Image (spheres, rainbow, N blue to C red):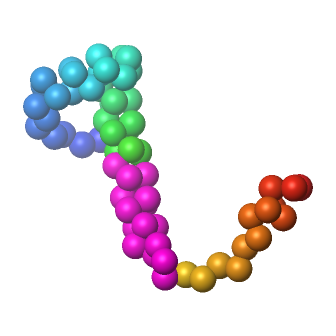
């Protein structure tokens, strides 16, 4: 998808330097993937202590 957006150049350049990603498109893709992953983790954390899983970790580790 082609989209025109106004981004702060200093943020894009810093992100490119820190990640060693060479194109603006790829750095934006990486940023979006990281944002999505972070939000999914936060959503999963909401279930902490609310789901009772009957899992025997010792048994699983022996496999």
Quadrant (top left/top right/bottom left/bottom right) for the C terminus? bottom right
Observer-nearest of 24 and 62: 62
Left or right of residue 27, residue 61 in this image: right
Residue 25 at x, y = what percent?
33, 30
| Quadrant of residue 31 within the rendered picture | top left
Q: Residue at x 46, y 67 (%)?
A: 44
- Is 60 magenta? The answer is no
Could you tell me what secondary structure mostly forms the magenta stretch?
helix
Left or right of residue 4, residue 53 in this image: right
**Does 20 sit above or below residue 27?**
above
User: What is the number of callouts on the image?
Assistant: 0
Q: Which residues are magenta?
A: 35-50
- Is 49 magenta? The answer is yes
Left or right of residue 60, residue 48 in this image: left
Q: Residue furthest right?
A: 63
Left or right of residue 54, residue 45 in this image: left
Asked whether residue 59 appears in the rendered view, the answer is yes
Observer-nearest of 6 and 32: 32
**Does 35 sit above or below residue 4?**
below
Residue 26 at x, y = what percent?
38, 29
| Quadrant of residue 7 within the rendered picture | top left
Observer-nearest of 49 and 34: 49
Q: Residue at x 21, y 20 (%)?
A: 13
**Does 47 sit above or below residue 63?**
below
């Amino acid at each position: 998808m082609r989209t025109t957006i106004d981004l702060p150049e200093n943020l894009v350049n810093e992100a490119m330097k820190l990640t060693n990603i060479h194109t603006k498109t790829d750095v934006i893709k990486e940023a979006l993937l990281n944002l999505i992953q972070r939000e999914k983790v936060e959503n999963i954390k909401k279930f902490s202590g609310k789901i009772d899983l009957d899992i025997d970790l010792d048994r699983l580790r022996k496999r």
